[in-house]
Image (cartoon, coloured by chain):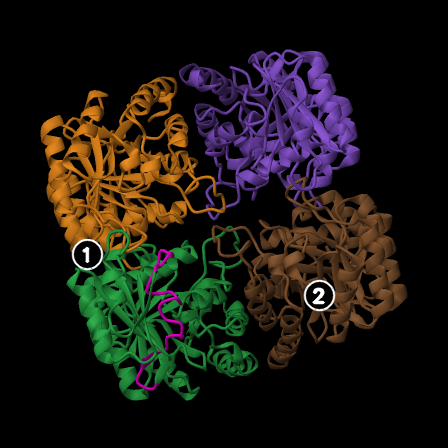
Chain colours: A brown, B purple, C orange, D green
Amino acid sequence: MLIVMTPDATEADIRRVTETIESIGYKAHAMPGASRTAIGITGNDGPVDPSPFQELHGVLECVRVTKPYKLVGRDLKHDKSVIRAGAAEIGGVEPAMIAGVCAVESHEQTMLTAEVVAAAGCKWFRGGAFKPRTSPYAFQGLAEEGLKILAEVRDTYGLRIVTEAVDEPSLDLVERYADVIQIGTRNAQNFQLLKRAGQARKPVLLKRGMSSTLEEFLLAAEYVMSEGNYEVILCERGIRTFSSHTRFTPDLSVIPAVHSLSHLPIIYDPSHSTGKRDMVVAMARAAVAAGADGLLVDIHPYPERALCDGPQALLFDMFRELVDEMRGINEVIKRHRA
Amino acid sequence: MLIVMTPDATEADIRRVTETIESIGYKAHAMPGASRTAIGITGNDGPVDPSPFQELHGVLECVRVTKPYKLVGRDLKHDKSVIRAGAAEIGGVEPAMIAGVCAVESHEQTMLTAEVVAAAGCKWFRGGAFKPRTSPYAFQGLAEEGLKILAEVRDTYGLRIVTEAVDEPSLDLVERYADVIQIGTRNAQNFQLLKRAGQARKPVLLKRGMSSTLEEFLLAAEYVMSEGNYEVILCERGIRTFSSHTRFTPDLSVIPAVHSLSHLPIIYDPSHSTGKRDMVVAMARAAVAAGADGLLVDIHPYPERALCDGPQALLFDMFRELVDEMRGINEVIKRHRA
Amino acid sequence: MLIVMTPDATEADIRRVTETIESIGYKAHAMPGASRTAIGITGNDGPVDPSPFQELHGVLECVRVTKPYKLVGRDLKHDKSVIRAGAAEIGGVEPAMIAGVCAVESHEQTMLTAEVVAAAGCKWFRGGAFKPRTSPYAFQGLAEEGLKILAEVRDTYGLRIVTEAVDEPSLDLVERYADVIQIGTRNAQNFQLLKRAGQARKPVLLKRGMSSTLEEFLLAAEYVMSEGNYEVILCERGIRTFSSHTRFTPDLSVIPAVHSLSHLPIIYDPSHSTGKRDMVVAMARAAVAAGADGLLVDIHPYPERALCDGPQALLFDMFRELVDEMRGINEVIKRHRA
Amino acid sequence: MLIVMTPDATEADIRRVTETIESIGYKAHAMPGASRTAIGITGNDGPVDPSPFQELHGVLECVRVTKPYKLVGRDLKHDKSVIRAGAAEIGGVEPAMIAGVCAVESHEQTMLTAEVVAAAGCKWFRGGAFKPRTSPYAFQGLAEEGLKILAEVRDTYGLRIVTEAVDEPSLDLVERYADVIQIGTRNAQNFQLLKRAGQARKPVLLKRGMSSTLEEFLLAAEYVMSEGNYEVILCERGIRTFSSHTRFTPDLSVIPAVHSLSHLPIIYDPSHSTGKRDMVVAMARAAVAAGADGLLVDIHPYPERALCDGPQALLFDMFRELVDEMRGINEVIKRHRA
């Protein structure tokens, strides 16, 4: 159920609806939009009776939600969501470049990279301190030590930090040190972790599961939002198919598909999907042209020495060129961002 | 590195090798076999120097492991592993029938079903108390209340209990109440949960990720074993493909593939892979003929009223017939079990 | 549209309905069953008006067909179709073993193999004279010379011949020399070739396209049948998925799925789907247990010297054992064949 | 084997090498490049002995080809191939827009559409006269009558014609009426048709099989080229995956992958891959940004009345906007075209 308020509904009107919802034992999710606020109801078993709400002041209409997701949908919130951390934003007119290191390996490697990112005029930095690795014997990240280096990146260069959490304890730490909590593809249906992220007070960057359908992807976001955290950034990172010239097949069609169904921003990770440096640049450009709200890109000062995923990391010069091209392409297509 | 002991090596010989491994800072994993014990080494960065071990008494040879997994492989342990709980076993001469309810919904539904399972001569019971659901608004299981009903099944009918854990707190509970800890397909690469399961003192039933390759599947088991829990049962449950006449495409070829690479038993879940009752029986028979070490099957007293996955639950009569056919097929093919 | 005749309808009744259909410009497809004949109508644009038929003698009812296929469906013909060549059959109570060589390479290799097949009590022989190869530079088969060797196999051992056609000229030759015309997976949607096969006077063994859905598979058979050739044998041969431990993922679930929708028999090719000898036997047994109407198996006197697909060919001893096991498993499950 | 000539080798030098190759019974394929000519050898069984060629005048070196394909590779011809028909080209500095109707349905619909394509400054027209349809009962195209309408489009508007052939007779007709012979995804491994296309005197537009790997895609082109027709345009059109929000998953990563391995141009069909108008524009832009050499796009004067694939056809206004954006994006990225 979705309660749409009139354009001139007051804060008090909205509060009264919210309290009525909660008095019945449901959860209320108020989503302010440019012209009107809508309030989603979750926590119900079966259909909600609209009669307690229809007569309340400021209520325009009560709409039944027929899709399996409620809070991620355009029905509830028509205007696109913009996620902010300080002056940095994702979902606005400019695509966001979130560049950095795949794994934080050392203070030197991380700071060298951050300097390049900042110098290119970017506002976000990515770096993994907790790395989910297919083999138990592979490098698993520097953990809290890595987070401290990332915090120093923010202090030194003003870059906002995106980094992955892999369980509740690491999420606690990431929430403390970073600006955006990343949930990786292997945890895309780890529903307990999604619920915990929904209780966090920081935005969540949610990667698509490598075998998630669009509906499953949106429902993963719904898990986060249903706990009250509405700041979710979706991220395409490639899907599992038979095609073997890339590590994963980048499914860029999910970008316009998300935009038509959801108000959430969606970005693209060309590094992990292709796994090959010479495809990263082409696919990054493609995603921007498709309307992606940003890119999540690995770069590395000396990729041949990387502890993790070196072959996919861009060299610094390739990165600077990509930033320019991203801006150029956005000039051509930006009228479609709405 | 794998240290193979001579057939006449003593307990003391094995202990001395183990202590030498640990004194260098590595982990030792002794795997007794029918004719000899082998000791796996993990925790090393880069190659292990064999010289400290070669001269120890009872050491036959030091073998470099070239596969990405070490403890799951046939190199370390040639004889097939048999997992036991009381008189019930998985991996022996008879395929194990692990039947029960998809979700524990009520005391009555569960006990009615358990009675049928026990009467058919089966020794295991499955039932979900924690259900990972794609939508946050779907029934998520009875939690500890469900586990108590399952414990009553064991007390009343002597059936051994297999049930799923979805995070650390639920794993703690499952370890306390059940006989085998199930990890579901959506957590197949939730490495933190796999490590926690590796510290448990109960066997682990590990479902294949719906997009896991064979190597990733074996490495998930390696995560559990590398923490010291060697009792792992693998379970095929269907993979994500374009084919749409089943919920997931059952990949039965993974059964002989696992048998050739690993000593671990592998069972098959026809219910969740096909999602349709009329295919469950045919595919269950097929898996037994392919050499599966067991089946994990949903049945239900009145499937049309099931809270979860009713269309895939077998009726009681279909189930009894399947048990007979499973035994008949095993008579034909059992000489291949070794 | 489907016209169901009464059980006591005469030949003359059926002929009158058929003539009425053709007089309107449609095609009539009479399918006799155990208890009644049904007559399918194709060639119509849009819905067929039932009124010209309803009053005809012997007409029980006129049924609208809602599925995209008409002639392959159980609605038109409820009893399972049995395809025969002399004393050999596919779709009956016994699963058919169609064994032989992947490619006819020489007279000696083929006759040696045929002798083993006949000695095992099998009635069919397979062998490729026209080989569709991924590379233009790979061995493409002996063409008509190969067909002559196959004809000699039939003359010498009484085995019935299944062999592939790849275009119209080769289909002309195969129709002349062989008993069953095989259409391979790469031509599964070569609709012109399917239509030509539909004009042949020999049964057609139609492999599933490696990326065909069940519906596309059935519609490929419908292409053959709509031209008037109702003797079609379906064949599962593995589908393209991300899973890499087999060449193609065998989708055995298509066996019960076909049986529930269609009257056509369905067999399974374990050799081309797995590509590995040690999996062929396990998967062949599995398919029989799932209810497959037969197997299409590569064997070879000396596989290490094979010109094509040697690693998948069974050794003679493995083959003889498989024939025994196939019969044993069929004893257990044959009551399901109906 | 690949024979690289010196930059100053003469026509006569090249002829002598070619004749020497043919005298041994092989085929010679001379590929002139910007700075030197290379000559590929096919038709050999096993390795070619380089000694007859090494001493010939103008031969720089003899290189063994280790990839399964020879003529499509960058080793043989480093410079990108440009395919031309009159003033129209594919593979040059500007991406080619090949727009038109999915199926030629009528003279009016086709001419109306062609007028819009020509007015937008495009040089190519697409339109299907032979339509491979999944169902035998669907509209299969106007055949030669459709080709005549397409020829009229060329005469009236100067647009060059791309249209599909589905078997040898239709290929004969297409070769006569059109400028480029299209081979569809369902015939991507119809090797007999590929060979026939290789004997044609018109360029071939080869769609990727919906389940073809990159290597299989390139080997399909190799089939055409090995018969002597070197004018091949590759076309990505989406692959079969589990993802269901599009008809097929567009795999744009194949664009940079082809560019790094092959000299052939590669274009993209956003209409058939997505199947949905609102995704066509976004994906078309993306492909251009990824470096595609062109687009193959369905448009329709009144898509709601289309006989085939109406929901994917762009409206005329959307098409004009896309042409502008294609040019704008190309300005940003064209330095990568080389």
State left or right for residue D319 relative to residue A35.
Answer: left
Instruction: Looking at the picture, tell me which residue is in the foreground, C336 or A48.
Output: C336
Instruction: Looking at the picture, tell me which residue is in the foreground, D3 or D29.
Output: D3
Dot 1 alpha-carbon crowd within 10 angstroms: few under 14, some 14 to 19, many 20 or more: few
x and y percentages locating residue C316 in the rendered image: 28, 25
Which label was assigned to residue B279?
Answer: none
Q: Which residue is mark 1?
A: C24
The alpha-carbon separation of the residues under discs 1 and 2 comes to 69 Å
Residue A3 visible from this viewpoint: no
Q: Which residue is mark 2?
A: A99
Residue in the image at 39% along x and 41% along y: C238
The chain containing the residue under callout 2 comes to: A
State left or right for residue C275 relative to residue C320.
Answer: right
Q: Which residues are magenta?
A: D64-87
Looking at the image, residue A91 lies above or below residue B126: below
Secondary structure under tag 2 reads strand
Q: How would you classify the magenta stretch by its main secondary structure? A: loop
Can you tell which quarter of the image residue D263 is in?
bottom left
Quadrant where the C terminus of chain C sits is top left
Secondary structure under tag 1 reads helix
State left or right for residue B325 relative to residue B80.
Answer: left
Is residue D82 found inside the magenta-colored segment of the image? yes
Residue in the image at 80% along x and 34% along y: B169
